[in-house]
Image (cartoon, grey):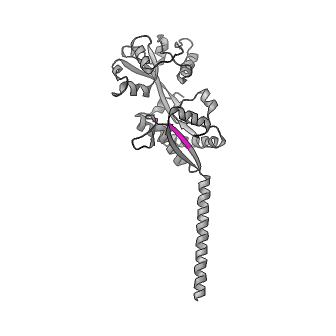
Amino acid sequence: MKKGLVVGIAAIAIIALTLGIRSSNKKAIAEEKITTINVAHTQNYVPYDYINDKGESDGFEVQVLKAVDKKLPQYKLKFTGTSDDDLLIGLESGKYDLGVKGAWYTKERAEKFIIPKEKIGASIIGFTVRKTDEQKYQSIDDIAKFGGKLVPISPQNAQWNVIEEYNKEHTEHPIQLKAAEAFNVSDAYAWVLEKRYDAYFDIKLSFEEAVRNEKGSYHQYADQLSYVPYKGIPTFPLLHRNDKNEKFSVAYDKAVKELESDGTLIELSKKYFGEDVFKFIQE
C-alpha cells in the first residue's frame, strides 16, 4: 500500500509538472505572438499629445491609440514622449514604429512613411483677422472675394497646399499666395494688426493657446484679433515602412472604424478639445 501511495503521488507530481510546463509553453507562445509597436509622440503638444502631471503619455491622439490597443490583443503599444525632430528621425530610422504629432497628410510624408487610410483626428484651420474686419471676413470665400492679403506661407508647409487647392477650385477669385521667408508667429499677428496683411492662416488651437488664453504669449492682442474657422484637416499616425507596420496599419484602420462607430472618437474629442473636431471636416 505504501509503495502504491508513493507511486500515486509520483504520478500526480509528474502530471502536475507536465501540465505546468505545457501552461508555461502556451503562455510563452502567446507572448511570442504579441507584436510590440513602439509609439513616439510629441511631449508638449497639448491637447494632441503630451506628458501629463503624473509623467504619463496623454492627449487626444495618445488616448485614441490606447483605445486601439485594447481592440487589438495581438499587439502591444509602448509609448514614448519625445521631441518633434527625434520623432521624425526615429521613424525614418526604424527606432520607432509609429509616431503621432497632429500630422496632416502630405505627398512628401506619404513617400517616406506608411499613412493609414483612417484618420485619427482633425486639426481646425482658419484665419486670424483684425476684429475691425470680422464682419468683412467671415469665411475663406470672403477673403478671396475682397482680395484679403495673406501673411506669406512657406511652400513646405501643408497650409500652402490647402490654399493652392482652394485656388484651383476658385479660379474666379483666387487668394493671393506669397512664399514666406523666416518669421516668428508674433510677426504674423503684428503684421495683421499693422495692416501689412489682412489675414494669417492659423490653426485654431494655436490661436486659442497663444491669444485667447490669459497665459498666452500674445494675449495682449486678444481684444484686437478675431478667428474665422475654415475647415478641419484630418490628422494621421505616421508609420515606419516595413511589413510589420503594414499589417498593423490594416488592423489600425479596422479598430478606428469601430471606435468611430461606437462614438469613442467624438467622446475623446469633446474631452480633449471641448468640441467635436470631426464635424469641421469637409468630406
> Which corner quadrant holds the C terminus?
top right
* Left-right relation of 56 to 77: left
Q: Quadrant of residue 24?
A: bottom right
Q: Residue at x 46, y 32 (%)?
A: 277
Is 42 magenta? The answer is yes
* Left-right relation of 113 to 227: right
Give how far across and how far down residue 235 sits, in percent: 53, 32
Q: Residue at x 58, y 75 (%)?
A: 13
- Measured along the vertical axis of the image, is residue 262 above or below residue 130? below
Q: Residue at x 54, y 34 (%)?
A: 86
Q: Which residues are magenta?
A: 38-43
Give how far across and how far down residue 5 sits, in percent: 58, 84
Q: Is residue 89 visible?
A: yes
> Which corner quadrant holds the N terminus?
bottom right
Give how far across and how far down residue 128 sits, in percent: 42, 19
Is 100 magenta? The answer is no
Q: Is residue 115 visible?
A: no
Give how far across and how far down residue 223 sits, in percent: 33, 19
Seen from the viewer's position, the closer of residues 106 and 168 is 106
* Left-right relation of 135 to 22: left
Q: Among all residues in the image, which is located at the extreme right?
A: 243
**Magenta part, dominant SS:** strand
